[in-house]
Amino acid sequence: MQVPFGDLTRHYLGMKEEIDAAVSRVLASGWFVLGRELSTFEEAFAAHLGVRHAIGVGSGTEALHLALVACGVKPGDEVITVPNTAIPTLSAISFAGATPVLVDVDPLSFCINPDLIEEKISARTRAIIPVHLYGNCCRMDEVMAIAGRHHLAVIEDACQAHGAEYQGGKAGTFGAYGCFSFYPSKNLGAFGDGGMVVTDDDERARQIVLLRNYGQLERYYHEIKGFNSRLDEMQAAILSAQLPHLESWNRRRREIAALYSKAISHPAVILPRQQEESRHVFHLYVVRCQARNALRRHLADHGIGTQIHYPVPCHLQNAYRDLGVPAGSHPVAERCAAEVLSLPIYPELSDEEVLYVAETINHFEG
Ligand SMILES: Cc1ncc(COP(=O)(O)O)c(C=O)c1O
């Protein structure tokens, strides 16, 4: 049996009529940027999260970048985040001109360890970006309390956490801004790039609306220096067709995760743990194994695709050598990088495929 790590063709074919109708509608409309499709999707996404404002932007990276700029982060400032995230979390900080300051993660949740944040706060710290990694949630009550004590803005990186919850609140709704990616493989994915910034605050929303569109509300009248970062009509229409399915897709992801957790039994393989206070939406199902590379080869030999999220922590990437953060400084994140392996997880996977992956792991001689 072949079980690819992801299968977006299967995903498309599963809802071909709805997607084709959305695409045709946009093509026939003759209107492709900042139109009714976008405002309809923004309203639906805001309602889904229970927030006042959702502003569609070009990507998750740009969502984070615009949120940082809107929070007044500028060259010379420091922004706290984690070393085991997708590099764009750090790229956004760099493009705002600020310096990322890294805090190690909790070994169970793979998310920021709130106990280690305060020792990294300096006079130059302006914001914290907690990353809700793999579809799990950070301990947001603790992060918000620390930010409140030190007057820091919180910008949530919810790019992997559409519909995840912490203590009943949705990921992306705790901080000043929540940032989402609609990269095709996400729990809610476009057929191209896309992103969203959400906020409850009217003035904060206005800042993002300005920043995404050359700093203008009225055409050719520029209130601030802005960018071009807009979720286009085609992607908005495709996302509108998919949003009503997000909840059932997340339920299926959780079902698959439960099936893996029940069926995988191997002394060398550590399964992901769910925290009681959060609702994990399993963007990724990530196991740990000291013989990770051998396990990956074994699965590939049996037709099973896997990925590593992420093989090199951000502070050890060539691009961030200038931070001067040495190996050994973030032991939990560094150990994760050496041991993590992401198994196939997407709503279209059958139970039979999931059980085949689990059995293949159980037969690993490592
Ligand atoms: C945690 C995290 N942050 C940021 C991003 C950036 O999103 P995008 O690829 O839409 O720019 C991603 C997606 O790759 C992500 O997984």
Image: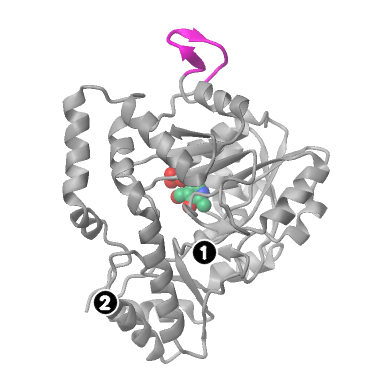
Is 217 covered by the magenta stretch? yes
Q: Which mark is residue 147?
A: none
User: Where is the C terminus found, in terms of image quarters?
Assistant: bottom left
Above or below, 223 against 202 in this view is: above
Is 223 covered by the magenta stretch? yes
For the residue labelled by badge 2, is the local secondary structure a helix, a strand or a loop? loop
Residue drawn at the location 20% of the way across and 46% of the way down:
18
- In the rendered structure, the answer to whether residue 74 lies left or right of residue 37 reads right
- Mark 1 residue CB less than 8 A from any atom of ligand 1: no
Residue 288 spot, x, y in % from top left? 52, 76
Residue 329 spot, x, y in % from top left? 72, 62
Residue 193 sits in quarter: top left
Q: Which mark is residue 280?
A: 1
Q: On the image, numbered disc 2 is attached to which residue?
A: 303
Above or below, 266 against 302 in this view is: below
One can see residue 93 in this view: yes
Q: Earlier in the sequence, mark 2 or mark 1?
A: 1
Residue projecting furthest to the top: 221
Q: Amino acid at mark 2?
A: Gly
319 and 201: which is toward the camera: 201
Residue 112 spot, x, y in % from top left? 66, 58
Q: Which residues are magenta?
A: 214-226
Residue 33 sits in quarter: top left
Residue drawn at the location 21% of the way across and 57% of the way down:
14
- Neighbour tally class for label 1: few under 14, some 14-19, many 20 plus, Cα within 10 Å: many
- Determine contact: label 2, label 1, CB under 8 Å: no
The secondary structure that most of the magenta stretch takes on is loop
One can see residue 74 in this view: no
Residue drawn at the location 43% of the way across and 33% of the way down:
56
- Neighbour tally class for label 2: few under 14, some 14-19, many 20 plus, Cα within 10 Å: some
Residue 264 spot, x, y in % from top left? 43, 85
